[in-house]
Image (cartoon, helix red, strand yellow):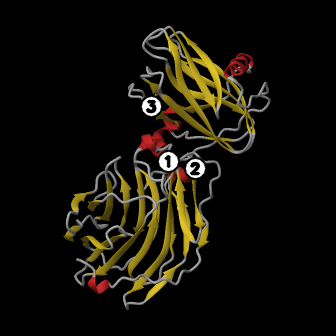
Amino acid sequence: MKQRRLFLYSIALILSGCGGGSATSPPVSEARILAAKAPAIAASALTVALAGNAFITTDTGGGEIINASGLANWNNAGTVTSAYFRMASAGSVTLGLDAKLSGSNNSSIRVTVNGTPFTVQLAGTASNTYTVGTVNVPAAGYVKVDLQGISKDGGYFGDVSALRVSTTATVNYANDAANYYWSRRGPSVNIGYTTPANTEYFYNEVTVPAGQDPIGSYFMANGFGQGYFGIQVKSTTERWILFSVWDADNGALTTLVNKGASVIKDSFDGEGTGGKAHLVYNWVAGHTYRFLTRAHPDGAGGTNYSAWFYAPEVGSWTFIATWKRPATTTYLTGAYSFVENFVDTKGYLGRRVSFGNQWARNVSGAWSEVTTANFAGDATVANAQRMDYAGGVDSGQFYLRNGGFFATYVPVGQNFTRPATGQQPTVNVSTLPQ
C-alpha cells in the first residue's frame, strides 16, 4: 500500500445547548417551516469543507465539480452533490451552508439531510451562512447531506464551500486540507498474515461480492515486502490482474525476466519506482479466484518474484510474470492483503472482499495453512479522516471493507483467526507455466 505522510489533527468539541425543533422525515412544507424556525448557526459551529467531504453522486453532465473551494459550476437541476460527516452518538444536529451566488441573483435549492428535505433560498453574491434546519439523528453513524437545485434566475444555483454543523455529539470528518485527495479516496485497510520462515510460495483465494466492485477498486491478494499482486477495476469495460515489484532499496532497477502471453509490461507511476505487469482480464464479482506468488533467491545477489492467477472460467493457472529484484536475497516475507480505492471521485462508494484458504509452502516443499492475521489501516485511518472501514472474519474467511460511509466501523490493531479448512492447494508448482 502506498505510504502516506501522517498529519496530526484534533477534533473540536461541539457546543451544547443548540436546541430547537427536530424533524424526522417531514414533508417538504414542514421542512420549510423548520428551516425558518431553526436556531441561527452559532459562530463556533464546525465547518465541514465540501472540498474534502463531498462528491458528485448523481452526475448529469452539467460540468459540476468539487474543487479546493467546494462545489462549483452548479448549473444542472438533476445533479446531486452529497456531503458526509459522522456523529459518534445519537442526537439533534442543526445545519447551515456556507454559500454564495455567482451568475444568478436568486436561487432555490433542496438540502436533504438523512432523507429529510429542506428548501433554502440563496440571494446575493456575498458569501453567507444560510440556516438549513435541525434533524434528529437516531444512532451513531454518518449523516448524508444531499444538495440539489430547484430553480434559479441565472446560470448557476450557487457555489457552496462548506456545511456548518452544530450538535452536542462528537463529530468526525476530513479536516486535513493538505490530504483531502486521500480522504476523498477513502480509507485503505489491510490484513497481515502470520507465515512461517523460508516461505517460498504463498497461496490465497479471493472473492469480491456482487455489487462491491465499483470503478477504482483494488483488491490486493498477495502482498509481500517488495511488491503486490491482485485485481483492479479500471473502468466500466476493463479490469486488470496486476503484479508489481519495487526497485531495490539501493535504487538498482527491477527487471523483467519473463511474462505470460498478453501480459503488458509497464513501470510504476506516482508510488515509487519498479516493475509492473498487468493482464487485461474481465474477472467477475461473485467468482472465487486463486493467487500464487513465489520468491526465490537467484544465487547471484538478487531475488526472482513470480505470480500466477487461476480463473475458474479458464480452469487452469495463468502465468503473469517473473521480476528480478537486484540487491535482494530473501524468500517471501510480510504477506498481506488490502482493499483500496484509487479514484478520488469514487470514494463515496463501498467495497468489500473476502480472502480465504491461505497457505504457505516452504523451501522444503511442505505446505502449512495460514489462519491468523492482523487488521491495520493507512494514514487516513490513523488520522481519523474517514471511519468507514472494517475487517475481521466472516463465514470462515478474512474480509475487508471500505468506503460507502457505513455506520459501524471496526477498530484497527486487532488480530483475527479464521477456522482452518485443511484444504491444501491442488497445485503442482513444478508444472506451472513460466
| Residue 272 locus on image (x, y percent) | 32, 56
Label pair 3/2, CB-CB below 8 angstroms: no
Kindly identify which numbered label has been placed on residue 66. Answer: 3
Mark 2 surroundings within 10 Å by alpha-carbon count, few (fewer than 14), some (14 through 19), many (20 or more): many
Q: How many marks?
A: 3
* Residue at 59 percent of width and 77 percent of height: 419
| Residue 239 locus on image (x, y percent) | 33, 55
* Residue at 36 percent of width and 60 percent of height: 283
> For this view, does 246 lie left or right of residue 342?
left
Mark-to-mark CA distance, 3 and 1: 16 Å
Q: Is residue 24 above or below residue 409?
A: above
Residue at image mark 2: 388
> For this view, does 263 lie left or right of residue 69?
left
Residue at image mark 1: 186
Q: Earlier in the sequence, mark 3 or mark 1?
A: 3
Label pair 1/2, CB-CB below 8 angstroms: yes
Q: Nearer the viewer, residue 87 or 405?
A: 405
Mark 3 surroundings within 10 Å by alpha-carbon count, few (fewer than 14), some (14 through 19), many (20 or more): many
Q: Is residue 242 above or below residue 373?
A: above
Q: Earlier in the sequence, mark 3 or mark 2?
A: 3
Amino acid type, residue under disc 1 in the picture: Gly
Q: Earlier in the sequence, mark 1 or mark 2?
A: 1
Amino acid type, residue under disc 3 in the picture: Ile
- Circle 3 SS class: strand
- Circle 1 SS class: loop
> For this view, does 406 lie left or right of residue 214?
right
Mark-to-mark CA distance, 1 and 2: 8 Å
| Residue 326 locus on image (x, y percent) | 25, 72
